[in-house]
Structures are given as structure tokens and as C-alpha cells.
Image (tube, rainbow, N blue to C red):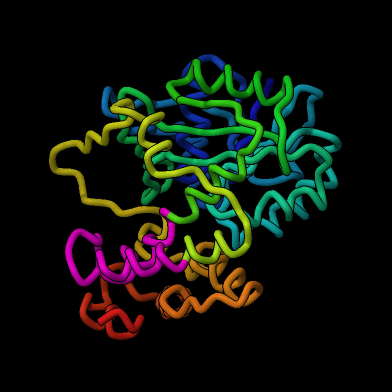
Amino acid sequence: MRYLIIGAGAVGGAIGGRLFESGHDVVLVARGAHAAALREHGLRLHTPEAVLTLPVPVIEGPDAYRPRPDDVLVLAVKTQDSVAALDAWAPVAGGAPLVCAQNGVANERLALRRFPHVYGMCVWLPSQFLRAGEVTAPCAPLTGMLHLGRYPGGADDTARQISADLTASRFLSPVVPDVMRWKYAKLLANLANAVEALSGPPAAPPLTEVVAAARAEGVAVLDAAGLAYASEEEQARLRGDRMRIRQADGEERVGGSSWQSLRRGTGSIEADYLNGEIVLLGRRFGVPVPVNEALQRLAVECARAGRPPGSLPPAELAARTGVA
């Protein structure tokens, strides 16, 4: 298989870099300064063991794509960028399988409108992308946990082959028939992303109280909708101690994907498809979700205004979400 990584940022760069390191054919899709740095210096993948310089081939878009029958497309852009990416790649990709290596639960449905073979991937992969050409994957001994399965359900030989390649590339990658159950569990965890991006790590009250309230709303909504999700105990049992973050001494403390969006000043943030997914389901099933509504609104406002991460005082966030 050849892996085309559409969106070679934190998640895409870590997955593509590890696959390339273990001998698989990989092409990274990137733009602008990131693409230029990748071409000139290769992908610099910072891991707990070493800083790897990987000469992964890179293209900037579908115009430069030359399809092969063994191609697998891995969509690793943020959800707010999915439609543009899917519309650009569907006309040239033929019947190639497409893997949604993304947070949230909206991408697979968007992809299935355009691609005949869609796979969900639940991404537990702490990773960082702040500088062009460089990605940090700080977990060891495994780089991440990537549940994989067909969408809307099931498993097949393609999923098993992708899983085998990922397993040989320092990932735990179970093939599961119910991948969306794992992605809904990850959605509940991702409700804290906006809190971290707006006000910093939720390590103490009142931020821990905001996160707990957002999650409680999420659980209530998923239960009302009849949507299954893996338990925290089930996730922890599978992960075990195989994914320990080993940040290098002196490295900047970096937050999750939403924090990094504000840090890079992208002007957009994924809250519409994380907290906003809970808002959507709450409205559909008549469950009040005021904390997630506030987090969605505040995160989007902050991103559009170009405010840096952590710029909203915790007490103010608690007050504006109604938790205080």
C-alpha cells in the first residue's frame, strides 16, 4: 500500500513519518511554507528516542497526484477543512479507500458522500505541529492508539492490512467492527479542548468543573440519542502504560489540537465539530447543553479574533459558561 497523507500536520505528520520510517510508501500533502520546508529538509519528526529526518515525498495538492491502484488516502485535516479537501480529492482518487484520521464524528459521513470506501480512525495520538517542517510525537514506547474500522461499521481485509502496517510502525491499531463507538468516546474527551485553548490546562477548579459539566452534558446527549461509546475504563485498559508522554527537557509546554490552532493563529478552531456536535445533538433530542454552547461560541470567537491560547481567565470562563 502507498499512503497519501492529506494534511501533514501534527496527526498526519506523525502517522506518515512513522509509516515512512518503517519502510512503507508515503506521500505527504502540505502547502506553503510547510511544504517548502518538507521538500528542502525532509520531515523532522521529534520522538522520545531521537529527532528523525525523513525524506518523505511531498506534493501540494491533487494536481500533482499520480494515482496508483494500491493507494490509501488518509484524511488528517481539521473537520472545518474536510469538505474542501474531500471535494478536491474525490474527482482524482477513483475508488481508493479513504481513512478519516480526525477528531469528531462528522467526517466519515461527509466522506461517504464522495468516496465509496470510508474507514473511521479513532485518534489517540498526542502530537504537535508549530513550526514548518517539524512535528513532535512525544509518546513512548508506542506513538499512539488508532482504532480502525469501516464506516458505518464492520471490518475487512483493507482495514486489517492498514492495521498491520500501523502496528509495525509503533502504533497500537486494533481493527474493530464498531469504530464510531470509540470515536464517540474520544468526542467526550475532546470536549475539554476548548477549555484548554481558552484558559489553559484544566488541572484545578474552576476549569476542572467546567470540563466535568461539559462532559456530563455530552454523556446525557449521547444517552438520549442512543449512541454507544466506549467507557474510560475500557480505553485505559487497552492503552495501559504503552503511551507515556516524554517531553524533552526545555521544550515549550504545548497543548492539544485546539490550543495549537490558536497558537499558530489559523483563524479557525474545531470547536464547531466537538462541543458543537453536542450542541447539535442536544437540540435534536431536547437536552439542554448550555456549557457546550458557551464553549463552542467562545472558542470560535477567540479563533476569529486571533487571540492567543490561554487568554481568557479561568474565573471568567467559569462565569461565562454558567459553571461559577
Q: Residue at x 64, y 41 (%)?
A: 120
The quarter of the picture where residue 164 lies is: top right
Residue reaching furthest to the left: 249
Q: How many marks?
A: 0
The quarter of the picture where residue 208 lies is: bottom left
Main secondary-structure element of the magenta-colored stretch: helix
Along the viewing direction, whichever of 74 and 40 lies nearer the viewer:
74
Left or right relative to 11: residue 106: right
Measured as percent of width and height from the top left, residue 37 is found at 46, 42
90 over 178 or under it: above or below: below
66 over 277 or under it: above or below: above
Q: Is residue 211 magenta?
A: yes
Along the viewing direction, whichever of 154 and 7 lies nearer the viewer:
154
22 over 28 or under it: above or below: above
Q: Residue at x 53, y 31 (%)?
A: 16
Could you tell me if residue 246 is visible in this image?
yes
Left or right relative to 36: residue 225: right
Could you tell me if residue 264 is visible in this image?
no
Measured as percent of width and height from the top left, residue 45 is found at 38, 32
Quarter of the image where the C terminus is located = bottom left
Q: Is residue 28 magenta?
A: no
Quarter of the image where the N terminus is located = top right
Along the viewing direction, whichever of 176 and 256 lies nearer the viewer:
176
14 over 128 or under it: above or below: above
Measured as percent of width and height from the top left, residue 138 is found at 30, 35
Measured as percent of width and height from the top left, residue 194 is found at 39, 66
Left or right relative to 165: residue 209: left
Left or right relative to 22: residue 255: left
Q: Residue at x 61, y 71 (%)?
A: 280
Q: What range is drawn magenta here?
A: 189-217
